[in-house]
Amino acid sequence: MRVLLYFPGDGLERWASALAALLPEAEVRAWSADAPAFQADYIAGFRPPPELFDREKHVRAVFNLAAGVETILAVPTLDPSVPIYRLEDAGMAEQMADYASYAVLRWYRDFDAYSELAARGEWKRLKPRRKRDFTVGVLGLGEMGGAVARRIASLGFPVRGWSRTPRASAGVEGFHGTASLAPFLIGSRVVIATLPLTAETRGILDRDAFAQMPQGSYVVNVGRGGLIVERDLLDALDSGRIAGAMLDVFETEPLPPDHWLWRHPRVTVTPHASAVTLRDASLAQVADKIRRCHRGEAVSGRVDRVRGY
Ligand code: NAP
């Protein structure tokens, strides 16, 4: 079997060597724009260039080295009948739960306000909040959102989650479907977006959504930038409806240096770093999936092209 690896940036040869070590029965190669066709059975990687699929005509499956699949689904040269499998957790869910916990505790315990007081040398205790008044809503209850919701619940906060289909989980109040989005938002003091970017979720956090959230609430986006209408967020921050935001993903990445989000005093920007792809865990998962696929066994994490995730 032949496996071709591709992702933009550095380290492709190193990753290909690591994958080859995990799949000794396979011939593994790193993509090169100058090399002739490899006749690959399987493609593993992220953001493949359209010419890859022009050249490789016998691809049996694609293994996306990321949880989000909106970019691979948009590659026009990929035959729609070729199955796509995505990364499932692979060490990312714990990172994302850490990131979300930091955001919730930071706002709940008023650490920003204490920093401002400290900068003025002012010794002043703020009135403590009550956890029961600080409901955290998690948009998406999959690998990422499920881990985030469980972790925040373990910290003692009331937690609710919103998904497309019903998802039962101890300590997490379930909401599902478009009709339940408004009641979900109305009671969420913090909204954490872990949704995939699809035709249904694009722009879901817009002016109307912010208007439904309680005055002085908070937003975390670790899903994809397109989930938030950035201009509407600016208005919601200016009006005080949204008191703060921690954003890891953006409509345009890298976020341009002159973008207002970098400079807004109540916005924290991180560079798509809330949950990074871990080489060893990800390649081990991909190697296992490729082997199963090659043996004709069931493989989890297949992307549904109609749903878009
Ligand atoms: P997942 O396991 O497929 O979970 C997706 C969740 O979103 C599911 O609960 C799903 O509902 C829900 N959902 C999808 N469309 C919906 C809709 N229209 N209405 C309501 N709920 C909807 O995916 P995952 O592994 O958790 O990853 C989620 C996303 O996180 C990825 O797509 C990626 O964009 C992002 N991500 C970001 C980073 C980062 O570093 N920032 C890292 C990893 C992942 P059902 O449960 O009913 O299917």
Image (cartoon, rainbow, N blue to C red):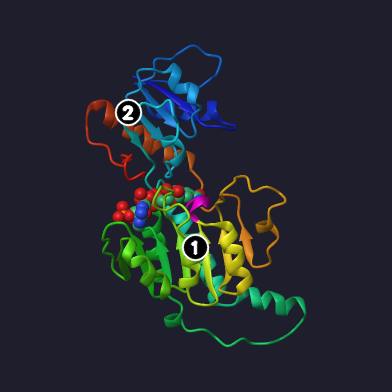
Q: Which residue is found at the position 50% from the left and 30% from the top?
A: 15
Q: Is residue 183 magenta?
A: no
Q: Residue 13 appears at what percent x and percent y?
A: 54, 25
Most extreme residue toward the left is 297
Magenta segment boundaries in residue numbering: 222-227
Q: Residues within 10 Å of mark 2 (few under 14, many from 20)?
A: few
Total tally of numbered discs in the picture: 2
Would the CB of label 1 be found within 8 Å of ligand 1?
Answer: no
Q: Which of 61 and 10 is in front in this view?
A: 61
Three-letter amino acid code at disc 2?
Val
**Disc on res. 82:** 2
Q: How far is disc 1 from disc 2 in space, using C-alphas? A: 35 Å
Please state if 120 lies on the left or on the right of 240 as rendered.
right
Three-letter amino acid code at disc 1?
Ala
Q: Residue 293 appears at what percent x and percent y?
A: 27, 30
Q: Which of 308 and 271 is in front in this view?
A: 308
Would the CB of label 2 be found within 8 Å of ligand 1?
Answer: no
Image quarter of residue 285: top left
Q: Which of 75 and 115 is in front in this view?
A: 75
Q: Is 205 rendered above or below residue 59?
A: below
Secondary structure category for the residue under label 1: helix
Q: Quadrant of the N terminus?
A: top left
Q: Quadrant of the C terminus?
A: top left
Residue under label 1: 100
Q: Residue 132 appears at what percent x and percent y?
A: 42, 82
